[in-house]
Image: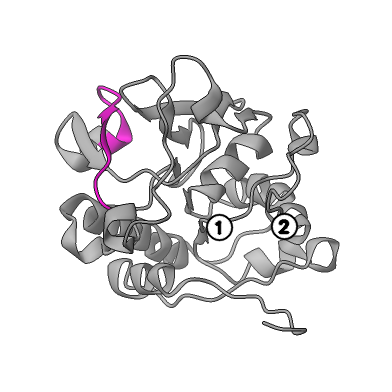
Amino acid sequence: MGHHYFHCVGEKYIAAVAEGAQAVPVLIPSLGDGLEARELLADFDGILLTGSPSNVAPHYYGGAASEPGTLHDAHRDATTLPMIPRVIEAGLPLLAICRGFQEMNVAFGGTLWQKLHEVQGYRNHREDIEAPLDEQYGPAHEVELTPGGWLERLAGERHLKVNSLHSQGVQTLGRGLVVEARAPDGVIEAFRVADAPSLALGVQWHPEWKFQDNPFSRALFAAFGEAARERARRGKVSL
């Protein structure tokens, strides 16, 4: 704000963790190399990667240079991308949303479309920034859940209606990731880490938005919270 910089997180994520997961949310600052991830992760029971207006810098996945004006966050990239594999290795539950979903794909060697709406065969997945927030975050399209997948078991059905507020999307899926949901145009909307010892899931939509009004979102954050409590019951592990 002004000449002062802040590390902050949207209240919607805080509420979803505090009320939906029944956990205490703690902000991890984006310090890049200045963060000792191994020591830090030993003190946490789960990690949530939030959405953001910024995009993962394309040089991390071999993409073309971004157009002028594209928002980036070099400190966040330098913090989350190396942290994600360590989170999985340590057995911490990981839930990644929107930018976090894209970070997770890149951390496992995947690539991204920078402008999904310009790729032939894909719909426009962006929100109308002129619309009220309730419309921007309102249901936009269905996703089909992978038969027998983790999300289908959680939802108890094959289809969900989700919101859509992204311009980027998965181009190639990262190593060891398994698709859990797709949009009608085939875009990957959710995946999990196949061999993770705990919950390790990324979703492209925003389940945190008014999560209490959505039965599936409530179930998702409850599952994240339970996985974190299970990790706490097991105690600290050597990282």
x and y percentages locating residue 9 in the rendered image: 53, 72
Q: Is residue 217 above or below residue 111?
A: below
The quadrant in which the C terminus is found is bottom right
Percent position (x, y) of residue 45? 50, 65
Q: Position of residue 79 (x, y in %)?
A: 73, 58
At 44% from the left and 21% from the top, the residue drawn is 122
- Asked if residue 137 can be seen in this view, the reply is no
Q: Which secondary structure, mark 1?
A: loop
Q: Which residue is mark 2?
A: 73
Q: Secondary structure at mark 2?
A: loop
Asked whether 107 or 51 is in front, the reply is: 51
- Which of the two residues, 43 or 238, is positioned nearer the viewer here? 43
Q: Is residue 8 above or below residue 101?
A: below
On the picture, is 236 further left or further right than 143?
A: right
Residue 109 quadrant: top right
Are discs 1 and 2 less than 8 Å apart at CB?
yes
- Figure coloring: one colour
Q: Earlier in the sequence, mark 1 or mark 2?
A: 1
* Residue at position x 64%, y 28% in the image: 110
Horizontal side, residue 22 vs residue 27: left or right: left
What stretch of residues is rendered in magenta?
137-151
Tell me which amino acid carries mark 2. Asp
* Mark 1, residue position: 52
**Separation of residues labelled 1 and 2 (CA atoms):** 9 Å
